[in-house]
Every structure is written in structure tokens, then in C-alpha cells.
Amino acid sequence: MGGLPDLGGWAIAGGVAVLVAAIAAIAERRRNNRKNIENVGFMPWPFIMVMALLFAAISIGLALKGF
């Protein structure tokens, strides 16, 4: 009825995306500091981190704007 929109969903999605980006950053640091140089892994942690931060910025921006 013309009240304020519920923006909690966008804020929660942004918070989860920041958490995913933090996990990706920790995983990339662990991958760079590994003892066995041959054991690389297959996850593209920098790409995951950048995409999560981009999604976080967009969703938190939408929550602040009041979309």
C-alpha cells in the first residue's frame, strides 16, 4: 500500500556475496602459499572473488537506493 519496500533481501544477498569473496580470497592465499608446487587445484579463485565482489556492490547499492 505504498509503504517502504523490503530491502532486506538485497542486503542479505550482498552480505552473502561478501562472505563468498572472503572465502575465495582465503582460498587463493592458501593456494599461493602451498608446499607442494605441483598440487595446484582447479578452482578459479580470483574470478570467483571478483564476481562475488561485483555482485555484492550491485546488490548493496540496490538495497541502499531502495529498488
Image: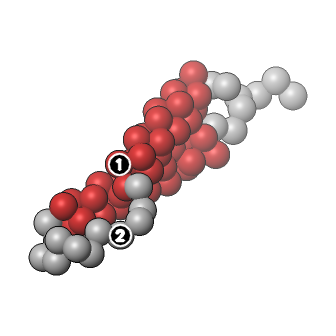
- Disc 2 packing (10 Å; few <14; some 14–19; many ≥20): few
| Of pointers 2 and 1, the one earlier in the residue sequence | 2
Quadrant occupied by the C terminus:
top right
Q: Amino acid at mark 1?
A: Pro
The image shows residue 12 at horizontal and vertical percentages of 55, 49
The residue lying at 70 percent from left, 29 percent from top is 4
The residue lying at 29 percent from left, 69 percent from top is 40
Colour mode?
secondary structure
Residue 66: numbered disc: none
The image shows residue 47 at horizontal and vertical percentages of 42, 46
Describe residue 45's horizontal placement relative to residue 31 as left or right. Answer: right
Q: Is residue 66 above or below residue 8?
A: above
Give whichever of 41, 23 is nearer the camera. Answer: 41
Describe residue 31's horizontal placement relative to residue 18 as left or right. Answer: left
Q: Amino acid at mark 2?
A: Gly
Q: Secondary structure at mark 2?
A: loop
Give whichever of 28, 7 is nearer the camera. Answer: 28
- Disc 1 packing (10 Å; few <14; some 14–19; many ≥20): some
Q: Which residue is mark 2?
A: 41
The residue lying at 41 percent from left, 55 percent from top is 44
The image shows residue 14 at horizontal and vertical percentages of 51, 44
Q: Is residue 61 above or below residue 36?
A: above
Q: Secondary structure at mark 1?
A: helix
Describe residue 39's horizontal placement relative to residue 13 as left or right. Answer: left
Image quadrant of residue 66? Answer: top right
Q: Which residue is mark 1?
A: 46
The residue lying at 82 percent from left, 24 percent from top is 2
